[in-house]
Amino acid sequence: MYTLLVVLAVVVSILLAIIVLVQESKGGGLASSVSSANSVLGVRKTTDFVEKATWILAGLLVVFSVCSSFFATPATKSADDIVNDIHTSAPAPQLPGQPAPQPAPAN
């Protein structure tokens, strides 16, 4: 379920980026090159569709993000276990100029 929600969030975010690029800004944006859609739907209807699509995709992205946080697998180790692992597995520091520690002889 988590993987499905992440894939849907990625798809929605890509679509949202495309829709935002199509929107008309003060400089004209990419919407000025979409004149064929303006002649078919009318200028006002095109901007309404793009604005509604932006809000819907943004809402879906929020919903998918929140839902994926509920399905994420929790960490299996506690913070105390991680600290203990670090302290027990860390090698003793070797200072420069000192000989390397010798392993204990086997009897």
Image (cartoon, rainbow, N blue to C red):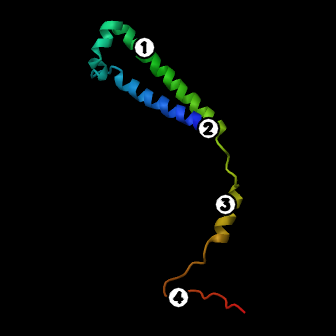
| Quarter the N terminus occupies | top right
Q: How many other residues sit within 10 Å of disc 3, few (<14), some (14-19) or many (≥20)?
A: few
Q: Give coordinates of residue 3: x percent, y percent.
A: 58, 38
| Residue bearing mark 3 | 82
Q: CA distance from mark 1 to mark 3?
A: 51 Å
Dot label at residue 98: 4
> What residue type is disc 2 on?
Tyr
Most foreground residue, 9 or 23: 9
Disc 3 or 4, which lies upstream in sequence? 3
Q: Give coordinates of residue 65: x percent, y percent.
A: 57, 33
Q: Are marks 2 and 1 in contact (CB under 8 Å)?
A: no
| Residue bearing mark 1 | 49
Q: Give coordinates of residue 24: x percent, y percent.
A: 33, 19
> What residue type is disc 4 on?
Gln
Disc 4 or 2, which lies upstream in sequence? 2
| Image height of 21 relative to 72, above or below | above
| Image height of 73 relative to 78, above or below | above
| Residue bearing mark 2 | 2
| Image height of 94 relative to 86, above or below | below
> What residue type is disc 1 on?
Phe
